[in-house]
Amino acid sequence: MKEKILPLLFSFALTSLVNAAPPPGSFTLTFEEDFSNPIIDGSKWKVGPADAFIEGSGGCNVDNFNVTGGALSIKATTDPVDYCWTTYDYSSGELTSFLRFKQKYGYFETRAKWDSVSGMWPAFWLMPERDQYGTKEWKNNIFLKFDLSSAGIGTVTDATLRLCAKNVGNTAGSDPNNLQLFRVASDSWDEGTINWNNQPVWDPLYIEQKFDYDAPAGSYVDFDVTDYVTVEVGSDGVISLALADEFRRARGQWYHSKEASNSAHWPQLIVNGVTYYPTDDATVVWGNQAEVEFGASNELSARSMYYDPTDSTGIPEPVIDGVPVDLGKGMEIDIMEAYGVLGAYQMGHATHWDGYGAGHKVSGWGPVPVMDVGEYHTYGLYWEEGLLEFYVDGVKTGSRQDARVIDVPAYILLTLQVGGSFVGNNPTPAINNQSVEFDYVRVWEGTKSGTVPLATIRNVDGTVSFGNDHAVYGGAGNSGAVVTVEDDGVGMSISKNGWIKFPLSYTVTSDTWLEFTFDSSAAGEIIGIGFEEDDTNSNDKRVFQLAGSQTWANAWQDSNDYVVESGPVTYSINVGAFYTGAMTHLVIVSDDDSNSGIYGQFRNVKITEGPAGGTPIAIGSLNNGIAADDSRSGTGYLMYSASNVISRFGAYMGNADHVIAVLYSSGQWYADKNFGQVAFTPDPADVLLATVDFTNDTVNSLEGVSGTEHGIQYGYATGDLGYIVDWWNGAANDGEFGVTGTTFTPW
């Protein structure tokens, strides 16, 4: 936590809170994945996107997925992997909801963290999924069941699934075939009743993939299933398997079933050299045959459809039966996208549309500051007709409103790619076993109730509510800014190169103070804030520069101390000490002529006569002081609790009624009871009054400091409190603390 005090200006670090919910409005949960099961749910997810493709230099590797501790982990490794067409130098992973879940409009959110190592490319994003799948009856899956429960098998040394080809289609190059083998947990199905609509769910982490393979009629195709058979033999001895093409290769693959006239063509499971035949095998077919059973057929079929417009980011209008059909507007939406080379403090949002060729278009927001991407944060998207809004930890950080916004359903992608086209994001051996973790994914239907205010106003308490009435400041050459205003107007963010002004009439006196919280992950050349009475930025000094690679001569430099990627910092500037007079606008400067990267976030802006502060709070009875464990080491705090600490925490008898020593460790707050400690959840009224070094017996007041520390207000505006180390009941006493005074005023 940073504290900096300058004459007439104060700046304090602020840690943002992690929120997890849609913006205010009317919403209904439609999709929830908490990763509470160690087996990935195949009814919600598949490996890879709609097609056999992945960007970057890492191929999708099923060994790189893991669910543990209630989170999905996708890791990058230096293991080469064969994935579809290519042998990749690195391994990574993509999990998507294609053909499982899609939705148009609503709120989409994940909670995620990742390792910021060069080469990492984690993302949470959406892609179009129209109801245009080609011929649905060409989507076929195969199911096989082998009952080895009475086979008397002990140790499994090897096991092979063998299929005899009947007619395996393959077009080398443009449309090669694809076949994946999956584990099926449920053995309750049988060939007489299974169909598309009741088919069991498979584990999406396939056992093996065969891509662009040839199998002449009568030849055998083998799969190594030793590990899976070992597990099942050690359980109930029944092995269920599925085969499918999950990448829309549109190549039919027919095999003989156990109903074939020649038993040599039947599917086989060869375990330790002994051949077993299936008790059940069947094909299931989508479309108008979804309720038809094919278990009596003498052939098994795995195939899939392919139709480009399904996931097109363009506006396809194919001619069907001689009539052009409007299939809606597609778009890729990157809710969270990060590159490891950019470090641990930033990510971005982006939209891509009109394909990925010569007509490709892109817009982006960022780099958006995030306080340590190695810790969990929430990343969300609100989507309605003509509007996209991006959120980080519940704060709106980007928005797009126009007629080109996607208007077709979209599916979800959770991905970790490697490398990519971003300059400098090159993978090295350091990427090995680095990961992205997704704690949950949730989707809601509904609409938000909040809107951006039309006009910027100063409220009676001095707080500023930003509106949609901003305009270019200083001439047309400064018109490149991308501005995002939060629904309640409590904050705004600015990116790209541009200068803006918000209408706000205020007469600055010698005692006028401007308070705000500022955060930035890239400050460009100049970023700052101030008042203005005209549209000329070069006549009078009005702007307070906060950061940037250039020192602008026409800006006050007393507050030019923000360290990029240091987190939110609260500034309190006595503007009246620099200039006075009748002002007409609040201005924000975001200057970066190269457009290489700039993003500033201003929140909780307040204009007051005299320093801002809240209502004084009586500290209550201080009794003998604050008792703490004499053997404790490390750092902590003295905290004010509105509730009596003896009843709330079981504090030591004689302790002050409303002040107690606390510490934060491994994601949890603890209150020191002198003999032991108790975990607690912060209360909104809690305030950290002072920092404590238990090891070195020091205490430092947080008066004048404003911020938040792991959910507790950090510091207070003013007060008459004093703090004494090694003091109890009016006398020296090692390890305890004394407090003097009667009141303090929170922010």
Image (spheres, grey):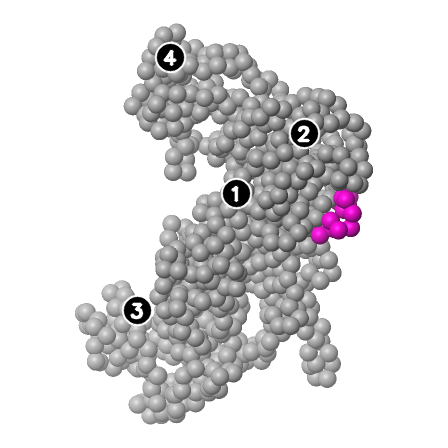
Q: Tell me if residue 394 is in the magenta stretch.
A: no
Q: Which residue carries the number 4 mark? A: 727
Residue, disc 2 = 514
In 3D space, how far apart are the residues under numbered discs 2 and 1 (Cα atoms)? 23 Å
* Type of amino acid under label 2: Leu
Residue 519, above or below 185: above
Q: Residue at x 60, y 66 (%)?
A: 128
Q: Is residue 470 magenta?
A: yes
Q: Position of residue 49 (x, y in %)?
A: 51, 68
Q: Residue at x 62, y 31 (%)?
A: 558
Q: Which residue is mark 1?
A: 565
Work out which quarter of the rendered image holds the C terminus and state it: top right
Marks 1 and 4 close (CB-CB < 8 Å):
no
- Residue 472 lies, in percent from the top left, at 76, 46
Does label 1 or label 4 sit earlier along the sequence?
1
Which residue: 70% across, 75% down?
Answer: 317
Front: mark 1 or 3? 1
Apparent side of residue 54 relative to residue 728 in the rendered image (left or right) = right
For badge 3, the amino acid type reads Tyr
Question: In the picture provided, is 273 more to the left or to the right than 581?
Answer: left
Question: Could you tell which of marks 2 and 1 lies nearer the N-terminus?
Answer: 2
Q: How many numbered marks have been drawn onto this rendered protein structure? A: 4
Q: Which contiguous range is marked in magenta?
A: 468-481
Q: State the residue at coordinates (58%, 22%).
A: 717
The residue that disc 3 covers is 228
Amino acid found under the numbered disc labelled 1:
Glu
Badge 2 element: strand
Camera sees residue 641: no
Q: Main secondary structure of the magenta part?
A: loop
